[in-house]
Image (cartoon, helix red, strand yellow):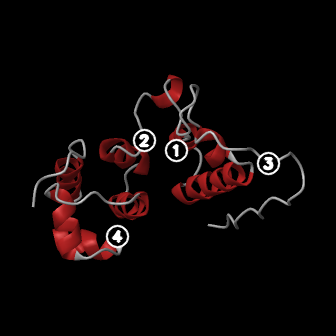
Amino acid sequence: MASLNVGGLGEYLREQRRNAQLSLRQLADAAGVSNPYLSQIERGLRKPSAEVLQQVAKALRISAETLYVRAGILDAERGSGTADDGTHGPDTRAVIFADPVLTERQKQALVQIYDAFRHENGADDAAAGGPRPADGGDTPPAPPDFQK
């Protein structure tokens, strides 16, 4: 299996795991992923989802944003670059993930709501050159419960 280019994510994870004095098995158990899968991530053979990275970050007690950047999910300098929809300007997701006051769970919830609003307003179609629906109408989704 060829190694994937995930920006040194695997090496960084291995270093963080060793700094936390955790075995591969202990981290896998704490993050809720399989031992072989975590091993493949560390060796650069698998690119994990944002959800898996969040679980691993929580288990290591480190910032999930750092893992997202290393995995190529977030661009470290996206604030003035190209947004997810191909337009120029700040990337709302990156700003949310960079907020040090919010918990990882709150960040994920905000991003999900943001994506739902964009989808509802036809941002996916607009980025592809398709039509946008008229304003108004549907009720926005209820915000998630933020109890800790």
Q: Is residue 42 left or right of residue 113?
A: left
Q: Residue at x 63, y 52 (%)?
A: 115
Percent coordinates x, y for residue 107 in the rendering? 57, 52
The image quadrant of residue 41 is bottom left
Percent coordinates x, y for residue 68 in the rendering? 38, 47
Q: Is residue 56 left or right of residue 17?
A: right
**What label sits on residue 133 in the rendered view?**
3
Q: Residues within 10 Å of mark 2 (few under 14, many from 20)?
A: some
Disc 3 residue type? Pro
CA distance separating discs 1 and 3: 29 Å
Residue most toward the right? 137
Cβ atoms at labels 3 and 2 below 8 Å apart? no
User: Relative to residue 3, is residue 74 depicted above or below?
Assistant: above
CA distance separating discs 4 and 2: 21 Å
The residue tagged with tag 3: helix, strand or loop?
A: loop
Cβ atoms at labels 1 and 3 below 8 Å apart? no
Percent coordinates x, y for residue 33 in the rendering? 31, 74
The residue tagged with tag 1: helix, strand or loop?
A: helix
Q: Residues within 10 Å of mark 4 (few under 14, many from 20)?
A: many
Disc 1 target residue: 97
Q: Residue at x 33, y 73 (%)?
A: 30
Number of labelled discs? 4
Cβ atoms at labels 4 and 2 below 8 Å apart? no
Q: Nearer the viewer, mark 3 or mark 2?
A: 3
Q: Residue at x 56, y 39 (%)?
A: 85
Disc 4 residue type? Ala
Disc 4 target residue: 31
Percent coordinates x, y for residue 12 in the rendering? 21, 47
Nearer to me, 128 or 105:
128
Of the residues under marks 1 and 3, which one precedes in the sequence? Answer: 1
CA distance separating discs 3 and 4: 41 Å
